[in-house]
């Protein structure tokens, strides 16, 4: 069949025309797509596999590496700090994601009413998300300063604490502070995206639910939540990936301290690779992010899978 | 009357109160940035004065920042890097998005899948091999190093967003142009692109703010003051040893945020459209 078609096409086609050849979907499509694909393969695909190759080497900075197999990963396995890093990353990711999800949903519901200056409010609430993270984190570092923290000033002024805690010096408080700052930055993204999702829900559905006797909670539980689920899923997936691999915020506020209490994968990998100059070991720590991330994404995909019905 | 009052109370409780608290939480750090940058060191490091307002405002930190550090140069670097990498990302993004949105060809599905996967690759996964690569190419301490690597973070997003916009162009318009003898390239440039202006603005604004925000690659690739961007310059040079120059740091943080905030304020709607496009439309 195809042979017949090809043969007839062969017969009809006059001379080969370069212009016409260019117009074919397959040719034009690939000519357009090829440059960016080559670019991404060269600077994302190749480095990814090259990173795996580096992680299998003992490789000090600027020296040729020696192939050592899985030694770097075995070292990670026996490194107590590595396991602390794993625990820290999970605590940080889970706590911050939950806060952002719940807070963001709450804020989206509040914003989904008619009020004056709605657009201005939305623009202002998004500011933490658009301002360069490092710069706003510097402001937070000053807010949490051991000697001149404005929070501690407020605690003292109201008589709640004297002299007030060391927000970044105490291991637990340091993690707490990081989670707060991460929430501060990421919550607007949740709120605005979920608000956009809320606005796509038809008011008729709420009317129908009300007629069926649903109250405020019932409407939220049986109309809002199920319809919002696919959006919550996508937003949460992004948020989990980028919180799990966060670097900037932690690097600026604590550099992983005090005593590794806030080190996460990215900051620890950076310390080992750039600070200690152990490229192979650093790459192995960075790559260790992949299995847990893949597991989280898979679990979320199964749990929150949009219903196909 | 009573109904009115109850309605008002309800509105206070479910709208204005949570909104007020959220705004306070969201904006306080910026207020703190601003007033800290205007205080003299004497006022800054005194525990006796009430810190919530500026008692004796001074521009000393701004003057010092602009005269004693390379802040203006960093700002220029950041701007150049953000503009060039955004431009590259928009061009590459469109080159990917148009065929994937409009045509069927072998491998198209694979390419779109690969783009989605690239979007999800977190940056810290690649910094070690990229650092080595940049070194071997001799691009360390050049703006080229970040101009080359930032689009890897931006292209997948731009492609994804633009794909949605290209699909909204009625196919009949393109067919009509093709029947009139326009080539595929002419159809794209003369018919499709002019109709997708808002998509390019959304993708561009988003890419621009992301490029201004990037820190990890800039920190690793740019170690000389002449090539630094604002975030790296502030962290690396306004903190000397253990000494934080808080006044200057806050001035730098504020000045560094202003360009992004201004551009953003002009295009809020486009920015929000870009932000929510991936999850709401997709």
Image (cartoon, coloured by chain):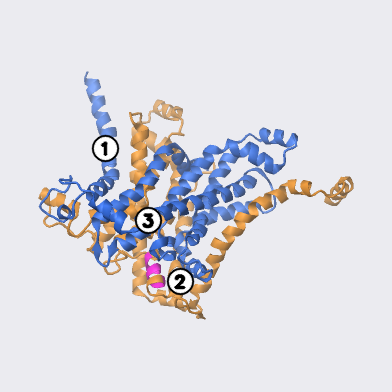
Chain colours: A orange, B blue
* Residue located beneath label 2 in the image: A284
> In the displayed structure, would residue A81 be above or below residue B48?
below
Q: CA distance from mark 1 to mark 2?
A: 46 Å
Q: Under tag 1, what secondary structure? A: helix
Determine the residue positioned at 34% across, 40% down. Answer: A124
Determine the residue positioned at 35% across, 34% down. Answer: A120
Left or right: A162 in relation to B209: left
Q: Nearer the viewer, mark 3 or mark 2?
A: 3
Q: Is residue B199 magenta?
A: no
* Residue located beneath label 3 in the image: B230
Point out residue B225 in the picture as x, y percentages from the top left corner.
Answer: 38, 63
Label 2 resides on the chain identified as A
- Is there one chain holding both mark 3 and mark 2? no
Q: Is residue A272 magenta?
A: yes
Which residue reaches farthest right? A11
In the rendered structure, find residue B20 and report the number of the disc placed on it: 1
Q: CA distance from mark 3 to mark 2?
A: 30 Å
Q: CA distance from mark 1 to mark 3?
A: 32 Å
Determine the residue positioned at 45% across, 41% down. Answer: B271
Residue segment shown in magenta? A267-273
Determine the residue positioned at 63% across, 55% down. Answer: A35
Q: CB atoms at circles 1 and 2 under 8 Å apart? A: no
Q: Is residue A230 visible?
A: no
Which residue reaches farthest front? B67
Point out residue A15 in the picture as x, y percentages from the top left corner.
Answer: 86, 48
Q: Residues within 10 Å of mark 3 (few under 14, many from 20)?
A: many
What secondary structure prevails in the magenta region? helix
Which mark sits nearer the N-terminus, 1 or 3? 1
Q: Is residue A211 visible?
A: yes
């Amino acid at each position: 069949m195809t042979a017949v078609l090809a043969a007839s096409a062969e017969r009809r086609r006059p001379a080969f025309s370069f212009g016409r050849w260019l117009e074919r979907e397959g040719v034009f499509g690939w000519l357009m797509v090829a440059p960016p694909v080559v670019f991404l393969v060269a600077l994302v695909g190749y480095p990814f596999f090259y990173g795996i190759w580096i992680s299998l080497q003992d490789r000090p900075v600027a020296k040729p590496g020696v192939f050592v197999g899985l030694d770097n990963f075995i070292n990670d396995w026996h490194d107590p700090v590595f396991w602390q890093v794993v625990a820290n990353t999970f605590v940080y990711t889970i706590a911050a994601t939950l806060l952002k999800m719940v807070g963001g949903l709450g804020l989206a519901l509040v914003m989904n009413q008619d009020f004056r200056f709605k657009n201005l409010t939305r623009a202002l609430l998004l500011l933490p998300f658009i301002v360069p993270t490092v710069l706003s984190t510097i402001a937070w570092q000053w807010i949490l300063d051991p000697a001149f923290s404005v929070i501690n000033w407020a605690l003292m002024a109201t008589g709640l604490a004297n002299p007030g805690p060391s927000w970044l010096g105490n291991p637990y408080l340091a993690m707490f502070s990081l989670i707060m700052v991460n929430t501060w930055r990421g919550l607007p993204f949740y709120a605005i995206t979920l608000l956009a999702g809320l606005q796509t829900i038809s008011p008729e559905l709420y009317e129908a639910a009300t007629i069926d006797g649903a109250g405020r909670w019932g409407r939220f539980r049986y109309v809002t939540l199920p319809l919002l689920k696919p959006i919550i899923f996508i937003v949460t997936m992004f948020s989990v990936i980028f919180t799990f691999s966060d670097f900037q915020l932690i690097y600026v506020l604590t550099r992983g301290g005090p005593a590794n209490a806030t080190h996460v994968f990215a900051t620890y990998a950076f310390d080992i690779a750039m600070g200690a100059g152990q490229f192979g070991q650093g790459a192995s720590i960075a790559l260790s992010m992949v299995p847990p991330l893949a597991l989280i994404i898979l679990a979320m995909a199964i749990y929150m899978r949009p219903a196909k019905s | 009357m009573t109904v009115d009052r109850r309605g008002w109370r309800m509105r206070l409780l479910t709208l204005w109160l949570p909104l007020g608290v959220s705004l306070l939480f969201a904006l306080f750090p910026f207020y703190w940035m601003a007033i800290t940058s205007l205080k003299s060191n004497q006022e800054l490091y005194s525990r006796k004065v009430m810190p919530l307002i500026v008692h004796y405002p001074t521009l000393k930190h701004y003057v010092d920042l602009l005269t004693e550090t390379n802040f203006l140069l960093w700002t220029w670097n950041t701007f150049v890097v953000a503009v060039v990498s955004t431009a590259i990302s928009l061009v590459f993004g469109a080159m990917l998005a148009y065929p994937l949105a409009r045509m069927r060809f072998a491998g198209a599905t694979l390419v779109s899948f690969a783009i989605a996967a690239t979007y999800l690759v977190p940056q810290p996964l690649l910094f070690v091999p990229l650092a080595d690569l940049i070194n071997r190419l001799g691009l360390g301490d050049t703006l080229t190093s970040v101009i080359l690597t930032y689009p890897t973070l931006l292209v997948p997003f731009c492609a994804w967003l633009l794909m949605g916009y290209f699909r909204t162009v009625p196919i009949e318009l393109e067919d009509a142009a093709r029947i009139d003898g326009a080539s595929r390239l002419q159809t794209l440039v003369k018919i499709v692109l002019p109709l997708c202006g808002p998509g390019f603005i959304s993708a561009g604004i988003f890419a621009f703010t992301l490029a201004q925000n990037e820190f990890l690659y800039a920190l690793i690739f740019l170690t000389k003051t002449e090539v630094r961007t604002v975030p790296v310059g502030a962290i690396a040079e306004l903190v000397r040893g253990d000494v934080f120059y808080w006044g200057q740091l806050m001035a730098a943080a504020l000045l560094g945020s202003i360009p992004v905030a201004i551009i953003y304020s002009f295009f809020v709607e486009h920015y929000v459209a870009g932000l929510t496009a991936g999850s709401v439309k997709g």
